[in-house]
Amino acid sequence: MRLTRVARFGVAVAALAFVATACGGDEEKSASESAQGGSLTVGIKFDQPGLGQRNPDGTYSGFDVEVAKYVAGKLGVQPDGITWKESPSAQRETLIQNGEVDYVVATYSITDARKEKVDFAGPYLTTGQSLLVREDNTEITGPESLSGGKKLCSVTGSTPAQRVKDQYAQDVQLQEFDTYSACVEALRNGAIDAVTTDAVILAGYAAQYPGQLKVVGDTFSTENYGIGLAKGDTDTRNKINDAIEEMIADGSWQAAFESTIGPSGYPLPTPPQVNRY
């Protein structure tokens, strides 16, 4: 039976699609495989002073950046082989799952829900949730004092603000923005009453605006920051865990903390124990 011209075209298209699939065009590379090529794409925050910040001259600085560079070095990649990609809280899992980043070091708390989607190495830092308010505010001293309809800001894709509403102040008004820097700006101009996230993040903003903002109250959660990577990439996760332990053991972890977070006045915490789950 002779094929029509349309049928022959359809067969050709199908054959090309099969060849493309057979060649592995959609296969994902592990972070270790990327490193073997001499380059890595690493997700960080661009707007968190002392942790992950893009500077006016185009460079990047902060504790997360230093951890990411140390890990990359242990994987065989020099700093100039790293491409930094902004990773807002709500996009971190998606960036990892889509293969847009090799790993994420972006104040990324390890949770059971997130571990269903991605893997974590670490933790490399432990902190806790707190509150940031204007310097002249004397009413807000902790999460319970947010009752009375006060306006509380956090970022989309994060859980701190909802935790306050669920556990401490049911009538608090929640406001979400894409970034913490947007929350901080709203706090400075009086549009909201407080910002909540981890104390180490808030300390950086308070230091950025001395005399304008302050961190108040004790921490009221435990947050373990991990390095997120593709689920099932156990080989790379083991290598990153090794790197974190080496960074702590050789003094690089403390030196990085003191040069980045230290100037904010946030105290040096005890180095965490890596969890090789």
Image (cartoon, helix red, strand yellow):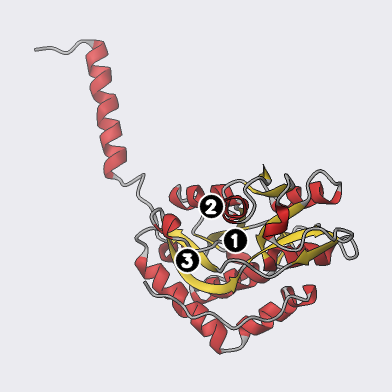
| Residue labelled with disc 2 | 92
Tell me residue 171's x, y (percent): 66, 45
Amino acid type, label 1: Ala
Q: Count the numbered circles shown.
A: 3
Give the vertical position of 248 relative to 64 (above or below): below
Residues at marks 2 and 1 touching, judged by CB atoms closer than 8 Å: yes
Determine the CA span between mark 1 and mark 3: 20 Å
| x 27%, y 38%: residue | 19
Q: CA distance from mark 3 to mark 2?
A: 20 Å
Q: Nearer the viewer, mark 3 or mark 2?
A: 2
Dot 1 alpha-carbon crowd within 10 angstroms: few under 14, some 14 to 19, many 20 or more: many
Question: Residue 106 — which label?
Answer: 1
User: Where in the figure is residue 111, as x and y percent of width and height?
Assistant: 46, 61
Q: Is residue 69 left or right of residue 7?
A: right
Observer-nearest of 106 and 243: 106
Q: Is residue 88 above or below residue 2?
A: below
Q: Which residue is mark 3?
A: 35
